[in-house]
């Protein structure tokens, strides 16, 4: 979630443990799949494929939190399954996290985006709260293993590995739900493999060559159209469906389709921006330069920087793209640019470079409403805040920026993952008297790679990145 707070949330950390590891379906140290995982005998919250991996994780981080996890287990004890409701589980999660005074909606937006390295020097320690909130529970009675009968253990779904059942309940869950969770598991493995091979924590499948003529993105129905009609993947038209599920039996082609689906979580930013530009700039097909401000820039936005070349490839007349990343989570190695505003030039493909097309990036550390008063500010063609969550998280910190944007001299694109976020945001904008170029609606350029929520409105609830979008009208 984009943030104006100096403490990034889970989405800002590209090195968080995979959801499969948090659910004890992967080794918590090396993240390999193994049929012989053994849990930590003390806390029983993490599993390892070998004594070597367990020792490595103990020295890296686990010794700092193991005793605390043991203490949480002891606080629970046996709970009968009869009459237990989802709210019972939800309330216990709040107590575990020491968040009794927290707005319930804040807990619901804790989602696990799984972009992870495997090297010790780059890995961020997984927090106590993250391990706690992802602890497996029975899908039907919502009990954790520490709440079962003595000696009873949870059994994982053999297909998705992300759902668990206690011995007292049926061992199944809906097939459609399981299929979605299998996508999460597949994407976990893709990101782990990608990190091992390339050191990168996100993937995308860009258009390989710039287009020679402009086709409106709005002419495409969905990502399937984008890949098979507007991009360079026309050969997959008969091999995948509109949900980007592979339909044939070739393992290598299946992997490529899975990479394409996983990659939408990166390029959702760029395609949503293109769709917004089409909505606010009538002559977008002939524009030679565009200036975009990314508000509350954090991990997801910076991870997607290479994908911004898709704007050059999609808009044939565009020769200069200027990007300004503004927020308290601006990368440490770029923070000195808050004083100099020296632009960083993104390396483009050979074709774009020969054509003299450029992408320049400047950064500024601080809230956007303060940035507009600096000498560096130039009115953008479009500003964008991806998944700000300002109505449910850090509302006080965000309010001065939102108040400015309600009557800013430029249009502003905003996105959200959950409907209750949209409801809250619309209430804030209404009170500020804002008007809209586009009212809140489902974004057809949302990420197609789902993420598992914890403490949502029901078990195994998933969200999609930038699921909702809307555009605030300029003054």
Image (cartoon, grey):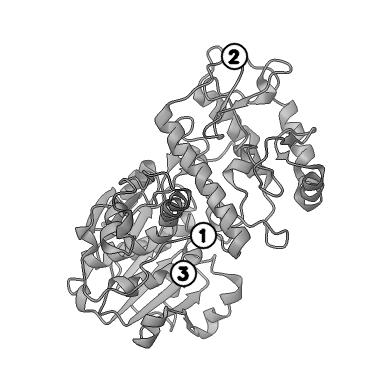
**Distance of label 1 from label 2 (alpha carbons):** 40 Å
- Above or below 31: residue 269: below
Kindly give the residue lying farthest to the top in the view shown. Answer: 82
Instruction: Identify which residue is drawn at 30% across, 46% down.
Output: 242
- Above or below 66: residue 306: below
Which mark, by number, is residue 461? none
Q: Is residue 387 something that shows in the picture?
A: no
Front position in the image: 282 or 203: 203
Per the image, label 1 sits on a secondary structure element best described as loop
**Distance of label 3 from label 1 (alpha carbons):** 11 Å
Q: Estimate the x, y position of residue 192 in percent, counting from the top left.
A: 59, 53
Instruction: Identify which residue is drawn at 36% across, 61% down.
Output: 403
Q: Estimate the x, y position of residue 455 in percent, counting from the top left.
A: 51, 35
- Image check: 138 left or right of 371? right
Q: Earlier in the sequence, mark 3 or mark 1?
A: 1
Kindly give the residue lying farthest to the left in the view shown. Answer: 282
Residue that badge 3 annotates: 305
Which mark, by number, is residue 202? 1
- Image check: 475 left or right of 269? left
Kindly give the residue lying farthest to the front in the view shown. Answer: 250
Label 3 CA crowd tier, 10 Å (few <14, some 14–19, many 20+): some
Q: Is residue 42 something that shows in the picture?
A: yes
- Image check: 34 left or right of 237? right
Label 1 CA crowd tier, 10 Å (few <14, some 14–19, many 20+): many
**Distance of label 2 from label 3 (alpha carbons):** 49 Å
Residue 128: quarter of image? top right
Residue that badge 2 annotates: 168
Q: Earlier in the sequence, mark 2 or mark 3?
A: 2
């Amino acid at each position: 979630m984009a943030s104006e707070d100096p403490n990034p949330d889970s989405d800002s950390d590209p090195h968080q443990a995979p959801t499969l590891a948090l659910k004890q379906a992967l080794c918590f140290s090396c993240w390999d799949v193994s049929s012989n995982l053994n849990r930590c005998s003390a806390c029983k919250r993490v599993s390892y494929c070998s004594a070597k991996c367990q020792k490595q994780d103990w020295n890296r981080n686990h010794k700092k939190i193991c005793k605390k996890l043991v203490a949480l287990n002891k606080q629970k004890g046996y709970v009968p399954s009869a009459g237990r409701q989802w709210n019972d589980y939800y309330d216990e999660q709040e107590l575990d996290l020491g968040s009794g005074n927290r707005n319930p909606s804040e807990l619901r937006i804790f989602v696990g985006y799984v972009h992870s390295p495997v090297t010790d020097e780059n890995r961020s320690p997984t927090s106590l709260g993250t391990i706690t909130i992802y602890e497996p529970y029975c899908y039907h009675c919502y009990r954790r293993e520490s709440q079962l009968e003595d000696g009873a253990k949870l059994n994982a779904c053999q297909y998705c590995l992300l759902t668990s059942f206690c011995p007292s309940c049926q061992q199944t869950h809906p097939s459609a739900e399981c299929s979605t969770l299998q996508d999460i598991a597949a994407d976990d493995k893709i990101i782990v493999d990608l990190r091992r091979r390339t050191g990168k924590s996100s993937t995308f499948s860009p258009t390989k060559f710039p287009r020679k003529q402009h086709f409106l993105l709005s002419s495409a129905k969905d990502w399937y159209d984008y890949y098979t009609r507007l991009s360079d993947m026309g050969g997959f038209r008969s091999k995948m469906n509109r949900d980007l599920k592979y339909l044939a039996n070739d393992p290598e082609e299946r992997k490529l389709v899975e990479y394409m689906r996983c990659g939408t979580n990166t390029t959702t930013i760029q395609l949503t921006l293109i769709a917004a530009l089409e909505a606010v700039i009538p002559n977008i097909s002939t524009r030679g330069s565009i200036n975009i401000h990314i508000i509350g820039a954090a991990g997801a936005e910076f991870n997607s920087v290479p994908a911004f070349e898709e704007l050059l490839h999609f808009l044939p007349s565009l020769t200069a793209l200027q990007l300004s990343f503004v927020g308290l989570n601006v990368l440490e190695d770029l923070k000195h640019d808050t004083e100099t505003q020296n632009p960083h030039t993104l390396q483009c493909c050979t074709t774009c470079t020969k054509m003299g097309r450029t992408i320049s990036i400047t950064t500024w550390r601080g809230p956007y409403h303060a940035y507009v008063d600096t000498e560096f500010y130039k009115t953008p063609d479009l500003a964008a805040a991806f998944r700000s969550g300002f109505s449910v998280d850090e509302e006080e910190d965000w309010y001065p920026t939102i108040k400015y944007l309600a009557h800013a001299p430029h249009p502003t694109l905003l996105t959200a993952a959950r409907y209750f976020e949209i409801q809250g945001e619309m209430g804030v904008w209404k009170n500020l008297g804002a008007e809209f170029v586009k009212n809140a609606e489902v974004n057809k350029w949302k990420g197609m790679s789902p993420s598992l929520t914890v403490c949502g409105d029901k078990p195994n609830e998933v969200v999609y990145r930038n699921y909702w979008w809307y555009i605030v009208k300029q003054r």
